[in-house]
Amino acid sequence: MSAADPFGGDDVRAVRAELDRLVTPEHVHRRLYTDPDIFERELRTVFGGSWAYLAHLSELPTRGSFLRRRLGRRQLVVTRAGDDSIHVVFNRCSHRGTMLVTADRGCERVFTCPYHGWRFDVDGHLRNVPVPSSYTDVRSGRFDLGRAHVAVYRGFVFGSLAEEPLDLLDWLGPARPWLDALIDRHPGGELMIHPTPLRYEFAANWKVSWDNAADGIHANFAHRSYNLLGQETDTTTVLDRNPALTPIVSRSLPHGHAVVDQRPSIPDGPWSTMRPLPTSNELVASLGERGLADRDTLDLATGSMLNLSLFPNLIFVGNQLMVVEPVEVGRTRLSVYLIGAPGAPEEVDLLRLRVDEDFVSFGTPDDFEMFERIQDGLLIPEAEWIDTSRGAALDTDDPETVGVVMGDVATEAPIRGYLNEWTRLMTSEQRLAAAPSTRTPSTQAPTPRASARTASAGSQAPGSAVRR
């Protein structure tokens, strides 16, 4: 690392000065997508210094349930403890650093280190060790697993390594009613996440997926083959719209979030945009036999037509929840989870399977090809800059909500918005640290029996909305 390349160091002023040069109101330098030092700093600060999505409570159905997750390069385990509190602990034995959990999900009463046999309760507290007399302070709590701050909003679990993270509701801000809308369209406000995602990897920087998430122009061009499939069945897909005429509204929200509301462009409802799919006629007929094939039920089988992005890693598209996970500076993993509607007729979820198979089969590959073409193009050193100015002269501030910028489907305001938050996190002086332990150090030796825990900075009671 040289003085002119400060991203691997702790000199925040030097980082800020360099980013002032690399990020302008209408352009960004290609290094944001190609520089390994910038990437490593992102993994620490962007995927540690803010809230990031980790799980949904429906994926942790019973006490002892766990999920293996990553936050930057940090291996984490999300758990439901014996008192139903939710915890996010480091997937690292506090003795010698051995990774404890290798399964993506499961259910355990304790985690046992395969190296030296240390055992931990699923809330991260040390239960017992071989030959405890070898230590003078095994009862002090310092050997409990490290943990992240955790907060739950209506079933969605978020984690942060910021020493003093922003209140979750403040972080959601104006994105909150859009998230509520996605939840409340399900009967009783109840949804579930199918546990096994479709996992993809593409050879491009993670931010190209974020650039794409709220891009309203590309659908007519990158997804031309998908739109042609609709035309062959006399169906106008939601993507097959004239971008100069559509009333779709795009909003850049505080903290890097964004939403694209496609509903104004489809007055006949989302189901009207779906072409015939395998078994869809039979499933609709089954609903009709019971008098349930009304517009609201069929619309529930398709997406909400609200594309909501919660920076830095959660994107809602259709009935899919997509988690963006940086792997290397030029490689990204995307996990796509299907959202179920447990309170709806069974046919609705079966239709959702068919609907979401449709786009991930015929549309998602188009995006990945564009992402990789972008990454290859950005490797040309003589062409340094990327334009992000589209719509800047036409965007307006939302008169009702501070910090919200509104534009038409063509605006790149969401890109400019998330880059503002990205820059803030990259230059933040806030310390990143493990959250405090949720249990007062005991004066007794660790025992095989777990005691009740109370929600605190490192745990979350599922019934409450935010971090306590």
Image (spheres, rainbow, N blue to C red):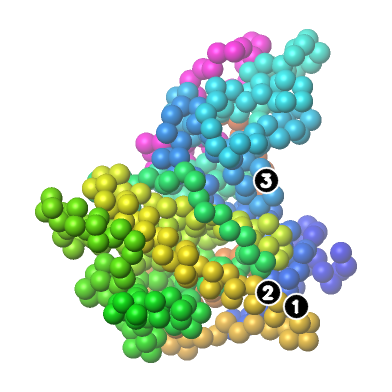
Q: Looking at the image, is mark 3 or mark 2 nearer the viewer? A: 2
Q: Which residue is mark 3?
A: 74
Q: Secondary structure at mark 3?
A: strand
Amino acid type of disc 3?
Arg
The quarter of the picture where residue 439 lies is top right
Task: Write down the region rendered in magenta.
Answer: 439-468
Image side of residue 290 versus residue 430, left or right: left
- Residue 462 counted in the magenta span: yes
Residue 38 percent location from the top left of the image: 73, 65
Q: Locate the N terminus by quadrant.
A: bottom right
* Image disc number at residue 275: none
Q: Residue at x 51, y 17 (%)?
A: 451
Image side of residue 115 versus residue 302, left or right: right
The quarter of the picture where residue 16 lies is bottom right
Q: Looking at the image, is mark 1 or mark 3 nearer the viewer? A: 1
In the rendered image of this protein, does residue 268 appear above or below residue 193? Answer: below
Q: Which residue is mark 2?
A: 375
Instruction: Please report whichever mark, 1 or 3, sits nearer to the chain's N-terminal start.
Output: 3
